[in-house]
Amino acid sequence: MRLLHTMLRTGNLDRSIDFYTHVLGMKLLRRTDYPEGKFTLAFIGYGDEKSNTVIELTYNWGVEQYELGNGFGHIAIEVDDAAAACAEVKRRGGTVTREAGPMKHGTTVIAFVRDPDGYAIEFIQKGTSGA
């Protein structure tokens, strides 16, 4: 078994694809419209779906916003340098919600950014976690 993808609902698919590809540097792997179901799926990631876990963006036609709730936490991405990753996100027009630094009660260097729909994305600096 292996983890295939995480699905996020989006209110504006093109805006979300732009964020994940241009701000976070992922690639659009595939995009499929389902007219009968009135939805579109787009798969994005850092590598192909056969050997990498990816994100599935789901756009239900006509739905512009979702309640995020409090059950979902965040997506985590390993980066070489969390501060540099934050600087690059800002340069590309993204929003940093927590600058890079050690996590509370630990030494792992983390940072948080937010996607256009409000989902949290954590950067974890490579080599700083105990895992």
Image (tube, rainbow, N blue to C red):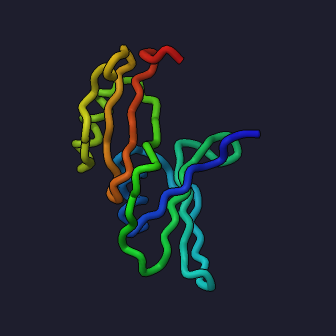
Drawn side of residue 113 relative to residue 36, left or right:
left
The image position of residue 103, as x and y in percent, is 33, 22
Residue 83: image location, x then y, percent: 28, 27
**Residue 120 percent coordinates (x, y):** 37, 45
Q: Write the residue at 54% across / 62% down.
A: 42
The answer to which image quadrant residue 122 occupies is top left
| Residue located farthest toward the bottom when viewing the structure as drawn | 36
Classify residue 76 as left or right of residue 92: right
Classify 1 as above or below 49.
above
Residue 17, image x, y percentages: 43, 59
- Residue 78, compared with residue 24, is above or below; it is above
Q: Nearer the viewer, residue 47 or 119?
A: 119
Q: Quadrant of the C terminus?
A: top right
Q: Does 76 sit left or right of 94 as displayed?
A: right
Q: Residue at x 43, y 43 (%)?
A: 74
- Camera-side residue of 91 and 98: 98
